[in-house]
Amino acid sequence: MGEIHAGAPAFSARVRRLSGFVHQTLARARRVPVPYKLGEVVIGDDPFNGRNEGRVAVKNGTFVGLQTVDQIFFYDYRQLRRPD
């Protein structure tokens, strides 16, 4: 028969604490502060979406939704710039 050691619950508690710490750290890393505000006019330049000018409509992590006259294009925030 297998024995249950007295130290087993402490080990699992340490693993849970470490797992929670890693989860929080990764969540913080994913929430990169996008330097553009909702409603701000920017220009997006991407080889796939082309160059579009519009207003920031959506911010989701590192992606920004750029509202043009008829569509929303999603860009990585690093592909956006303010108009000259």
Image (cartoon, rainbow, N blue to C red):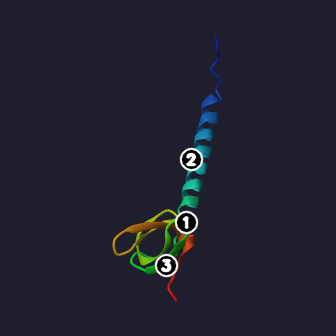
Decide: marks 1, 2 in contact (CB < 8 A)?
no
Q: Residues within 10 Å of mark 3 (few under 14, many from 20)?
A: some
Residue beneath disc 3:
43
Name which residue type carries label 3.
Ile
- Residue furthest to the left in view is 70
Q: Residues within 10 Å of mark 1 (few under 14, many from 20)?
A: few
Give me the residue at 59% from left, 55% from top. Answer: 25
Residue 3, horizontal then vertical, whole percent: 65, 17
Q: Establish if 25 lies above or below 41.
A: above
Name which residue type carries label 2.
Gly
Name which residue type carries label 1.
Val
Residue 32 numbered mark, or none: 1
Q: Nearer the viewer, residue 3 or 48?
A: 48
Residue 41 occupies which quadrant of the picture? bottom left
Q: Establish if 28 lies above or below 21.
A: below
Q: Nearer the viewer, residue 29 or 50?
A: 50
Distance between the alpha carbons at the discs numbered 1 and 2: 20 Å
Give me the residue at 34% from left, 71% from top. Answer: 70
Q: Nearer the viewer, residue 37 or 83?
A: 83
Give me the residue at 49% from left, 78% from top. Answer: 43
Distance between the alpha carbons at the discs numbered 2 and 3: 39 Å
Residue 53, horizontal then vertical, whole percent: 44, 78
Residue beneath disc 2:
20
Residue 12 occupies which quadrant of the picture? top right
Q: Identify the image quadrant of the N terminus.
A: top right
Residue 4, horizontal then vertical, whole percent: 62, 20
Give the secondary structure at mark 3. Answer: strand
**Which-is-in-front pick, marks 1 and 3?**
3
Q: Disc 2 or 3, which lies upstream in sequence?
A: 2
Q: Nearer the viewer, residue 37 or 25?
A: 37
- Residue furthest to the bottom in view is 84
Give the secondary structure at mark 1. Answer: loop
